[in-house]
Amino acid sequence: MIIIFNDSPSIPNRTIGAYRVATALRRAGYEVEVIDYLSSWRLDILIKYLDSITNIEWIGFSTKFYPPKQKSKTYLTSVISKQDNMYLGIFTKMQMDLENRLLNYIKSRNLKIVVGGPNAELVRHYTSVVDIVCLGYADNGIIDIHNHIVKNDNLIFDEFDGTKIVDCDKHYPVSDLSNLD
């Protein structure tokens, strides 16, 4: 199971990118769940729900509506110790301490974190928690990313501070968008 977190500025707005990636993965035979309005969830309920899913392979974050904005690399390198309620998180509209707890939970389950979307390029500055940053249209590249995570298959990527940066437009281009649904 693959979980993709999707946040938005207001209900009923949702980004299509998370659903395009989910569709590509489903067509390849993988089970995917998109969790919308991430910052609207109570963290204890979200974690309880995630605990009920025993076969999560990796977790993705969409950056469409909520681009990373903090400039401090120390934020994610000290995720466990930060307990700051004053600021919003890096990937979500959650308060920073709640986002930290979610990221710590994900890492405690030894799950990989993939971040994609139009603002994913900004994530390269917060790389100590993120495993893979996916740039561009990922309809084709996401399958190779998944197989790399699950089967250790080859993946074309650059590396930045230990994080894999996958340029899907360059290495896994979508040549025909006419059949997108």
Image: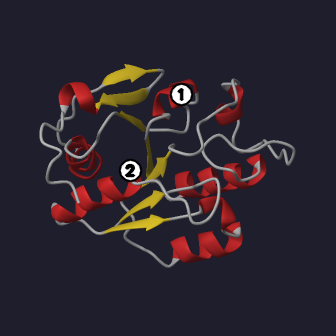
Describe residue 77's horizontal placement relative to residue 21 as left or right: right
Query: In the image, what residue type sits under mark 1?
Result: Leu
Tag 2: Cα neighbours inside 10 Å, few (<14), some, or many (≥20)? some
Query: In the image, what residue type sits under mark 2?
Result: Gly
Judged from the image, the secondary structure of the residue bearing numbered disc 2 is helix
Identify the residue under disc 2.
17
Most distant residue in the bottom direction: 52
Identify the residue under disc 1.
122
Identify the residue at horizontal 31%, vertical 31% (top origin).
166
Percent of width and height locating residue 42: 71, 70
Percent of width and height locating residue 89: 70, 44
* Location of residue 166 with respect to 7 vertically, above or below: above
Q: Earlier in the sequence, mark 2 or mark 1?
A: 2
For the residues labelled 2 and 1, say whether their Cβ atoms are less than 8 Å apart: no
Q: Which mark is residue 46?
A: none
Image quadrant assignment for residue 48: bottom right
Which of discs 2 and 1 lies nearer the camera? The answer is 2
Distance from the alpha carbon under mark 2 to that under mark 1: 17 Å
Percent of width and height locating residue 76: 65, 35
Identify the residue at horizontal 43%, vertical 41% (top origin).
117
Identify the residue at horizontal 24%, vertical 46% (top origin).
139
- State whether residue 58 appears in this view: no
In this rendered view, identify the residue nearer to me: 14 or 31.
14
